[in-house]
Image: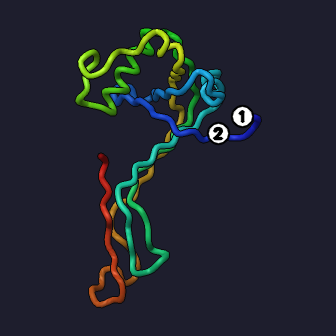
């Protein structure tokens, strides 16, 4: 906005069967959603932290992670049916054991009208990951001072 990049945490939906598209949702009054829905360039980042890597040497502490950076353009989704279908897919992505109309009520017309949904066409992407243990000079030595290893993190 005004030549400045915006960084806003949002939930997203990604369908592996259509890897060139990503969906984001937010409030209809969100300036950021309005900007990207009207064709402003967008950069989306996702990082999953898998572990904390500790070393016998301070500068060799690190993290195990998987990350992706996506560049593209977005368009607003205005069809209530398309919004409904995508919101259902988003709920299933995060809450795999929940069923529409059994575990939760469907979005109302008011809910659909109050929520902005944009489809991002991915034009470029880059992925990066780190896996493994510490790489300090004495990290594999049992006789060295200190300790080294990985604290594995898991998704809940």
Residue at 62% over, 23% down: 29
Q: Position of residue 43 (x, y in %)?
A: 57, 38
Instruction: Point out the image quarter for the N terminus.
Output: top right
Q: Badge 2: how crowded within 10 Å, few (<14), some, or many (20+)? A: few
Q: Is residue 4 above or below residue 103?
A: below
Q: Secondary structure at mark 1?
A: loop
Residue at 60% over, 27% down: 33
How many numbered marks have been drawn onto this rendered protein structure? 2
Return the mark for residue 80: none
Q: Mark 2 to mark 1: distance in Å? A: 7 Å
Q: Is residue 115 above or below residue 43?
A: above
Q: Position of residue 148 (x, y in %)?
A: 34, 76
* Along the viewing direction, whichever of 116 and 4 lies nearer the viewer: 116
Q: Position of residue 39 (x, y in %)?
A: 64, 24
Q: Position of residue 51 (x, y in %)?
A: 35, 60
Residue at 33% over, 80% down: 147
Q: Badge 1: how crowded within 10 Å, few (<14), some, or many (20+)? A: few
Q: Secondary structure at mark 2?
A: loop
Residue at 56% over, 25% down: 27
Q: Which residue is mark 2?
A: 6
Q: Which residue is mark 1?
A: 1
């Amino acid at each position: 906005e005004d030549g400045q990049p915006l960084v806003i945490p949002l939930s997203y939906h990604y369908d592996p069967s259509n890897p060139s598209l990503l969906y984001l949702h937010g409030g209809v009054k969100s300036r950021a959603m309005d900007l990207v829905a009207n064709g402003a360039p967008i950069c989306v980042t996702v990082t999953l932290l898998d572990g904390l890597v500790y070393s016998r040497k301070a500068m060799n502490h690190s993290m195990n992670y998987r990350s992706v950076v996506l560049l593209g353009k977005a368009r607003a989704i205005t069809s209530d049916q398309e919004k409904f279908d995508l919101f259902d897919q988003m709920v299933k992505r995060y809450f795999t054991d929940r069923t529409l109309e059994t575990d939760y009520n469907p979005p109302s017309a008011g809910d659909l009208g109050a929520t902005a949904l944009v489809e991002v066409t991915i034009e470029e992407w880059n992925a990066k990951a780190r896996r493994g243990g510490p790489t300090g000079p004495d990290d594999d030595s049992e006789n060295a001072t200190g300790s080294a290893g990985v604290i594995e993190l898991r998704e809940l």
